[in-house]
Structures are given as C-alpha cells and as structure tokens.
Amino acid sequence: MDILKNLTVLIYFLERLVEESKHVIENVLFFNNKKLPCVIKLICADAPAKSFILNVKGYTGYSSCTKCWDEGEYYERRICFSDKAGKDRTDHDFFFKE
Ligand SMILES: [Zn+2]
C-alpha cells in the first residue's frame, strides 16, 4: 500500500508542477512592469528528489545511474560507481526501464 500511496503523492506533485509550469510559460511573468518570457531549462533536485520525480531507484541501488549502465559495486555499505562512464543509457532504455 505504501507504493500506491507514494505513487498517488508523486502523481499529484507532478500534475501540480506541470500545471503551474504551463501557467507560467503561457502567461509571461511581470517584474518591474516588464514582461519576462519564461522558459524552463532544467529542474534542479537532490538525489532523493530526483529518484522520486523520475520514479527510479535511489542513488544507493545497483544500476541506479540514470545516464549509463554502470551497475556499481558494493563497498563499505554503499554502491560505488566506476570513474569511467558505462555504456550510455538511451531515452528509450530509460523510458521502458530496460
Ligand atoms: Zn553513469
């Protein structure tokens, strides 16, 4: 049930984020009587928030890198990734969780 509750919270949060983002983009911002067009170029989040938003494993899990296929190695109670990037994870791989 925790999964369903978390998923419900996640969907609610993301729907509000998308709704508010659309509003800001479609209805330019005003600052000092100047119209400021708004574009979202990135969303900055810490690792737990990123995994929550993307609905992926946390950074402490094997294969938790969202950019590549490096599985990582367990070392002293944590997962350590290689200093060499693994094979790139494509958008398709990520979307279909392959
Ligand atoms: Zn990686």
Image (spheres, helix red, strand yellow):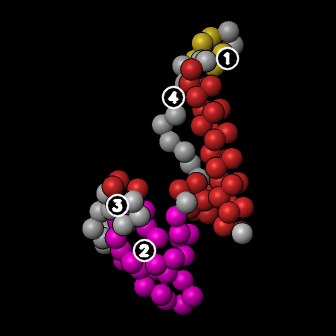
Instruction: Check disc 2 and give the amino acid type.
Output: Ser
Residue that appears at 58% across and 28% down: 22
Q: Which mark is residue 63?
A: 2
Query: Which residue occupies 49% across, 81% down?
Result: 79
Label drawn at residue 90:
none
> Which residue is at the far bottom?
76
Disc nearer the start of the sequence (1/3) = 1
Mark 2, ligand 1, within 8 Å: the answer is no
Magenta region, residue range: 56-83
Label 1 vs label 3: CA separation?
42 Å
Q: Quadrant of the C terminus?
A: bottom left
Q: Which residue is mark 1?
A: 31
Three-letter code, disc 4 = Val
**In screen coordinates, is 85 left or right of 41?**
left
Q: Position of residue 37 (x, y in %)?
A: 54, 19
Q: Which residue is mark 4?
A: 39
CA distance separating discs 2 and 3: 12 Å
